[in-house]
Each structure stands twice: as C-alpha cells, then as structure tokens.
C-alpha cells in the first residue's frame, strides 16, 4: 500500500465518539488503513492509548499514533463542510437519509471539490444521540 493517500482521501476524517472498548479503536484504524484513510479523531475515548488498541490495529499503528483526541464532537468537526453521522436505528426525525452507496457518492463528489468530510460513528452500546446527529 502507498504511504501517501490520494488527495481525495486526505479530506476524510473518521470520528469515533466515546468509544468504550480500545480494541474497537484499533480495529477502526486497521479498517481505515485498508481503505487508504489516515485521519482518526477520537472524542473522549474511555481508554486510549491502550495495548488492546495497538494489538487490534495490526499494521495500522501509524494511524493510532497520529490519532487526535478531543473533548467534544464540536472540536472533532472543526473545519468540516460535510458531516455524515451513522445510525443503526430508525429515527422519526425528518433528516436526510443516505444509503451506503449514496453516501459514498456524496463523499467522493464533495471531497473532489475540496470539502473536508467527517464520518461520525457513535458509542458501541447506544450510537449517536439525536442531538449529535442534528449537528
């Protein structure tokens, strides 16, 4: 794999909110590395840095080393032009919903125009709150 991601991928950051299991941070870093992503932002992780994150990263230690730890979701989203929150639950709030294919198309279009993009994932047990998704 190339050590330098294409410019389009450099516009995308992955944001994890209040991750409770450090292994999930490592697994995310590994998945990011496989996809050519390198910008990981952690909002108040419960345990980080942690040996379990390192073990699960398996070859993506560089992403963990460069991970930015911030206090709030607002801090994680500074400079973003497009923020995509994820949810496994149906919501009864009239927000725009994109399926994964539509989301990918939107990200490529926006990043190609220079937009900074955040893909936001919530807590393992409860996901993102409605307030967080509303941002």
Image: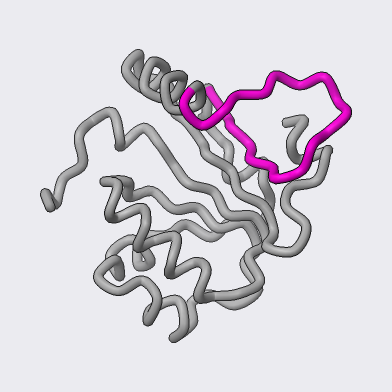
Q: Quadrant of residue 26?
A: bottom left
Is 113 left, or right, of 21 in this rendering?
Answer: left
Which portion, as a residue range, is magenta?
A: 82-101
Q: Is residue 90 above or below residue 96?
A: below
Q: Is residue 89 left or right of residue 105?
A: right
Across and down, in percent, residue 73 comes to: 67, 46
Magenta-colored stretch includes residue 40: no
Residue 90 within the segment the image draws in magenta: yes
Q: Residue at x 51, y 36 (%)?
A: 118
- The image position of residue 113, as x and y in percent, is 35, 13
Q: Residue at x 44, y 86 (%)?
A: 51
Which residue corresponds to the image point at 47% horizontal and 31% vertical from the top-left? 117
Q: Position of residue 97 (x, y in %)?
A: 67, 23
Q: Pick out the residue farthest to the left.
A: 2
The residue sitting at 30% across, 37% down in the picture is 10
Q: Nearer the viewer, residue 101 or 48?
A: 101
Q: Quadrant of residue 86?
A: top right
Way the structure is coloured: one colour
Q: Residue furthest bottom?
A: 51
Quadrant in the picture for residue 129: top right
Residue 98 image offset from top left, x and y in percent: 60, 24
Magenta stretch: dominant secondary structure:
loop
């Amino acid at each position: 794999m190339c050590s330098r991601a294409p410019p389009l991928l450099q516009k995308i950051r992955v944001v994890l909110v209040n991750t409770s299991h450090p292994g999930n941070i490592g697994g995310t870093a590994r998945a990011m590395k496989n996809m050519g992503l390198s910008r990981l932002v952690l909002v108040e992780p419960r345990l980080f840095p942690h040996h379990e994150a390192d073990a699960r990263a398996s070859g993506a230690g560089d992403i963990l080393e460069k991970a930015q730890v911030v206090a709030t979701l607002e801090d994680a989203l500074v400079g973003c032009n497009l923020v995509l929150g994820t949810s496994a639950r149906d919501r009864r709030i009239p927000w725009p919903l994109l399926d994964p294919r539509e989301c990918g198309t939107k990200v490529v279009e926006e990043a190609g125009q220079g937009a900074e993009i955040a893909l936001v994932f919530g807590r393992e047990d409860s996901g993102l709150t409605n307030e967080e998704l509303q941002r």
